């Protein structure tokens, strides 16, 4: 009986001594997870740009000066384009069944080109009316660390972001859903709204 009492006393002592250590380790793990989430959130930056296209419409092509799109951005960072209409935002490229045109976007260092073709044959030029499209939205997803080009498992930064979007079941055609997703996981930087006029001259609007 005496032995049982001694054993029970030792067990209780071990519990009393070990529980604070358990709490400390649990707290440390929780702090680590919070820190990792904070680092993850701060590791990405979303540059949002808006271009008023009405100065170049009606037209079958639009040329824009976008100095934010550098060679490094093209090589390593995802870029999403959306045409804003009076009703919604249409992700590029797109086949617009309602008005009968296809729209494609091409990017080069410092430049963005939009082309509109007839949906029927995909070749004939389609002159988009000025009342239909208002703005081009450009989302550039960048790592905060400019030197980051590869991440875990050897994936490129661009591939990792695309994979994360797929795993989160984000509908890329829904501009607001994409913006909400990134606003919860990155720092959003609105770079301004620009008015375009012929020929492709940009004038920044001071917010």
Image: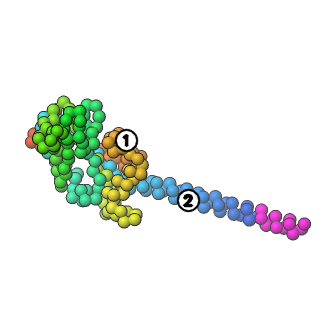
Q: Nearer the viewer, mark 2 or mark 1?
A: 1
Mark 2 and mark 1: Cα distance apart in space: 32 Å
Q: Quadrant of residue 53?
A: top left
Pick the residue in front: 130 or 15: 130
Q: Which residue is mark 1?
A: 177
Q: Residue at x 15, y 41 (%)?
A: 121
Tell me where residue 145 appears, x and y as whole percent.
34, 60
Residue 192 visible, this orientation: no
Q: Is residue 157 left or right of residue 68?
A: right
* Above or below: residue 64 compared with residue 39: above
Q: Which residue is mark 2?
A: 29
Q: Quadrant of residue 50?
A: top left
Q: Residue at x 25, y 31 (%)?
A: 86
In the rendered image, the quadrant that contains the N terminus is: bottom right
Neighbours of disc 2 within 10 Å: few (<14), some (14-19), many (20+): few
Tell me where residue 169 appears, x and y as whole percent.
40, 47
Span colored in magenta: 1-12
Pick the residue in front: 14 or 71: 71
Tell me where residue 11 appears, x and y as whole percent.
77, 65
Determine whether the residue tagged by mark 2 lies in a helix, strand or loop: helix
Pick the residue in front: 5 or 99: 99
Neighbours of disc 1 within 10 Å: few (<14), some (14-19), many (20+): few
In the rendered image, the quadrant that contains the C terminus is: top left
**11 within the magenta span:** yes
* Above or below: residue 62 compared with residue 145: above
Q: How many marks?
A: 2
């Amino acid at each position: 009986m005496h032995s049982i009492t001694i054993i029970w006393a030792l067990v209780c002592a071990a519990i009393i001594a070990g529980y604070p250590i358990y709490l400390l380790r649990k707290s440390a793990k929780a702090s680590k997870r919070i820190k990792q989430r904070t680092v993850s959130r701060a590791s990405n930056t979303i540059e949002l740009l808006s271009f008023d296209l009405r100065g170049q419409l009606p037209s079958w092509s639009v040329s824009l000066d976008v100095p934010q799109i550098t060679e490094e951005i093209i090589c390593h960072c995802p870029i999403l384009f959306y045409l804003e209409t009076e009703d919604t935002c249409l992700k590029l490229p797109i086949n617009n069944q309602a008005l009968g045109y296809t729209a494609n976007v091409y990017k080069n260092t410092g430049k963005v080109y939009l082309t509109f073709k007839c949906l029927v044959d995909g070749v004939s030029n389609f002159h988009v009316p000025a009342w239909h499209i208002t703005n081009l939205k450009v989302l550039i997803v960048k790592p905060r660390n400019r030197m980051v080009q590869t991440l875990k498992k050897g994936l490129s930064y661009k591939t990792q972001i695309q994979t994360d979007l797929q795993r989160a079941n984000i509908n890329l055609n829904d501009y607001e859903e994409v913006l909400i997703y990134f606003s919860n996981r990155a720092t959003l930087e609105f770079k301004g709204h620009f008015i375009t006029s012929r020929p492709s001259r940009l004038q920044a609007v001071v917010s």
